[in-house]
Image (cartoon, rainbow, N blue to C red):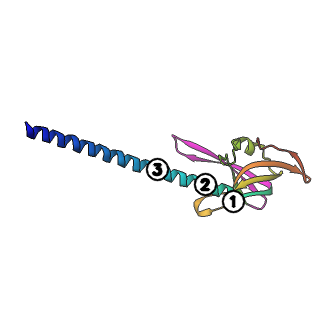
């Protein structure tokens, strides 16, 4: 009987150690995941704020790009200016801008806009500067703010 109690105690102790080990491993994985998410968010926010620009562009072309497969697609909105620069019109969590579809739709070929955006053109990664807000201008006077702020 003594040996059975000893073995049972050993099994319970082993089980407790294993459960603690599983708990420790879970906490380690959670900590690594939370740290990675925080670092990625900080890098994204830093990129959005450190590369912010305001410039005047005249729209030469507007086009849509559809990415995905038969199960899931994503529509991307782009514009090209008369200097042959391409921009993406995007929502931005960092600037609290959500109306990118309306912003792109309001942009007209041949019109000039003051745009606010962020980012760089990185060709090898297929990354374009992002436009988050526009303001149409005519003869150097503002007509309307159509960025849906």
Q: Nearer the viewer, residue 63 or 32?
A: 32
Q: Position of residue 35 (x, y in %)?
A: 49, 52
Residue drawn 68% across the image and 56% down it = 49
Separation of marks 1 and 3 at Cα, in angstroms: 27 Å
Q: Which mark is residue 73?
A: none
Q: Is residue 10 left or right of residue 35?
A: left
Q: Give whichever of discs 3 and 2 has the lower sequence position.
A: 3
Specify the segment rendered in magenta.
Answer: 58-84
The residue at 60%/54% (across/down) is: 44
Q: Name the main secondary structure of what is drawn in magenta.
A: strand
Identified at 73% across, 45% down, the residue is 104
Judged from the image, the secondary structure of the residue bearing numbered disc 1 is: loop
Alpha carbon distance from label 3 to label 2: 16 Å
Q: Residue furthest top?
A: 1
Other-residue count near label 3 (Cα within 10 Å), few / some / many at <14 / 14–19 / ≥20: few
Q: Nearer the viewer, residue 137 or 6?
A: 6
44 vs 60, left or right, is: left
Numbered disc in front, either 3 or 2: 3
Residue 7 on the magenta span: no
| Residue 33 numbered mark, or none | 3
Q: Estimate the x, y position of residue 58 in percent, counting from the top left.
A: 81, 55
The first of marks 1 and 3 along the sequence is 3
Q: Residues within 10 Å of mark 1 (few under 14, many from 20)?
A: few
Does the magenta segment cover residue 79? yes
- Kind of element beneath mark 2: helix
Q: Is residue 47 above or below residue 134?
A: below
Quadrant of the drawing holding the C terminus: top right
Q: Which residue is mark 2?
A: 44
Mark identifier at residue 51: 1
Asked if marks 3 and 2 touch (Cβ < 8 Å), the reply is no
Q: Nearer the viewer, residue 82 or 131?
A: 131
Residue 125: x and y in percent read 58, 60
């Amino acid at each position: 009987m003594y040996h059975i109690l000893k073995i049972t105690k050993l099994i319970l102790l082993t089980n407790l150690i294993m459960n603690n080990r599983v708990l420790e491993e879970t906490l380690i994985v959670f900590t690594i995941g939370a740290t990675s998410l925080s670092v990625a968010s900080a890098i994204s926010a830093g990129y959005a704020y450190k590369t912010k620009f305001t410039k005047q562009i005249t729209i030469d072309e507007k086009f849509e790009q559809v990415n995905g497969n038969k199960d899931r697609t994503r529509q991307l909105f782009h514009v090209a200016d008369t200097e042959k620069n391409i921009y993406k019109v995007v929502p931005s969590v960092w600037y609290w801008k959500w109306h990118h579809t309306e912003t792109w739709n309001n942009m007209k070929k041949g019109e000039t806009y003051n745009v606010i955006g962020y980012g760089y053109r990185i060709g090898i990664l297929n990354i374009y500067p992002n436009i988050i807000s526009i303001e149409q201008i005519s003869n150097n006077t503002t007509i309307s703010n159509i960025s849906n702020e």
